[in-house]
Image (cartoon, coloured by chain):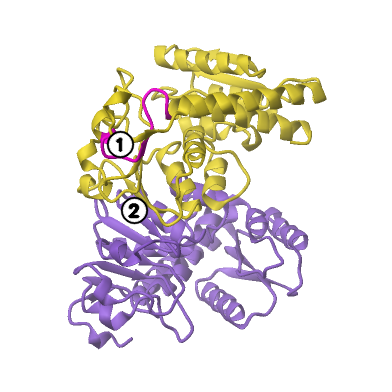
Chain colours: A purple, B yellow
Amino acid sequence: MSQTTSPTARLMDGSALARRLGAETAERAAALTARTGQAPCLATVLVGEDPASVTYVRMKRNRCAKAGIQSRHVALPADTGTAQLVDTIGGLSADPGVHGILLQHPVGPHVDERAAFEAIAPEKDVDGVTAHSFAAMSLGMPGFASCTPGGIMRLLDHYDVELSGKHAVVVGRSAILGKPAGMLLLARNATVTYCHSRTTDLAAHVREADVLIAAVGRARFLHGDQLKPGAVVVDAGYNVGNVGDVDFASAAAVASLITPVPGGVGPMTIATLLAQTVDAATRLSGAAG
Amino acid sequence: MSQTTSPTARLMDGSALARRLGAETAERAAALTARTGQAPCLATVLVGEDPASVTYVRMKRNRCAKAGIQSRHVALPADTGTAQLVDTIGGLSADPGVHGILLQHPVGPHVDERAAFEAIAPEKDVDGVTAHSFAAMSLGMPGFASCTPGGIMRLLDHYDVELSGKHAVVVGRSAILGKPAGMLLLARNATVTYCHSRTTDLAAHVREADVLIAAVGRARFLHGDQLKPGAVVVDAGYNVGNVGDVDFASAAAVASLITPVPGGVGPMTIATLLAQTVDAATRLSGAAG
């Protein structure tokens, strides 16, 4: 994981960019609060007490506090069913004091996660998990980006990565990461290939990538010897042991740009969540953006 | 275009399969009408008098009549604006006598086509053009398929084309054809590449396709010498002179399966529209499917 093992790749420093975006977001939150008398408010919903989920939610709420965004936490017991979860989220969707809603996932196998997501009002879907947000990302309509893909796009833009006409290979096809990441890249005129667990000869596809998005959820699944020299490598994985989906040391020796784990995509995900919460509050308050 | 020029490819006969699906649809329509006392009803909306659009709508209404599906036609003047069109479609969405809504496109450059599409209630979106339908196709939720991609999937299934693990290359990325086609193929575990006008070295991508979906809208844009031998070729193009996006003669000499134009994807598009209209009427009437 040491960044000194890379003889070629430049780091895409998500921590630094997230700090910058966070500072902007805090300024916008303060200005909005001054104008409207109400701070932006993110509701966080957690089902059960999975330690990783508890940590994620705490981290997001801490970041909110630092940015001048209120957060309201709803902790539900692990055995909460779909109907009750949908009800709770529906209440937050209707509550004028709430501007953004985050349902921490996973919600457990007994819950229909899609139904729960769909209870989030599109204008409060600052985590970009609803069908509406997915279609908006895909079809160029107004709407929120899923936070991880949205954060990735901000990172690529910050490092002036040319996307038009480039071949972007997305490994992974989840509804909130792989699929929307591909759609956002397609909207920016990349040629986009989706690979996944059923892909035959993954290595052949990865080797063609000018831009590689690793969104698999398997530690060090992809290696430098599989990459096209000079590829831009975005590692959206975060696995046990704080390691990504890409073997950093070998990949950094081949790539031109690469995100570290931690300190790459992760901070951008949270920064995007906060920025979108202020966007939502701005629109919902009717205040000028 | 002659089908006798193919020494190798088997034809995917969309006309024959559409007749079969049409007969099933007519039976279901008759049974539903008998049960509920109301025939399924498709509303068709046409803005202006573009000759091709007039012909398409007439053809669709004729097919409806043959299948025992009522149709109600709304002809609007060419200068109809977005607000009026949205209003008209909203009225049809609220009308309990209408089960499906088809807005014939293009609607003219002065109209916000997306706003018009979004006025279609999701449960009546039998043409599969709304954001909701796109997300449903993409995320595996209940909903209608866009008719052309939906028809393509029926055709591929009928000819037992294995999709899992295969590399499907979609050339074109429109909201109602290329994009949803790719999402449906991805849902069936194909590795999917989206190519388009900005793709660099299109030929290299086409050559990798086990399954090629041509959705470009340029006559004979793709040729047999670009194909992987044995590829399955689906030509969703329909250009002036009744020719597809693929040069049939040269492609049929290399492909293992190919759709003719006409008589391939086109008939399946209309057959899917009718089948989905009966699906919608069945659900809206509360009758057992």
- Residue positioned 53% across, 18% down in the render: B60
Seen from the viewer's position, the closer of residues B30 and B108 is: B30
> Height in image: B229 above or below B15?
below
Q: Is residue B197 left or right of residue A184?
A: left
Quarter of image, res A249: bottom left
Chain for disc number 1: B
In x, y percent, where is residue B229? 27, 45
Q: In the image, which disc is placed on residue A192? A: 2
Seen from the viewer's position, the closer of residues A176 and A133 is: A176
In x, y percent, where is residue B52? 40, 15
Quarter of the image with the N terminus of chain B is: top left
Mark 1 residue element: loop
Seen from the viewer's position, the closer of residues A269 and A52 is: A52
The amino acid at mark 1 is Thr
Q: Is residue B286 visible?
A: yes
In x, y percent, where is residue B239? 32, 23
Q: Which residues are magenta?
A: B251-264
Compute the Cα span from label 2 to label 1. Answer: 31 Å
Chain for disc number 2: A
For the image, the number of numbered tags is 2
Instruction: Name the chief secondary structure element in magenta.
Output: loop
Alpha-carbon neighbours of circle 2 within 10 Å: few (<14), some, or many (≥20)? many
> Height in image: B85 above or below A59?
above
Alpha-carbon neighbours of circle 1 within 10 Å: few (<14), some, or many (≥20)? some
- Residue positioned 78% across, 35% down in the render: B286
In x, y percent, where is residue A96? 67, 55
Quarter of the image with the C terminus of chain B is: top right
Quarter of image, res A1: bottom left
Q: Residue at label 1?
A: B8
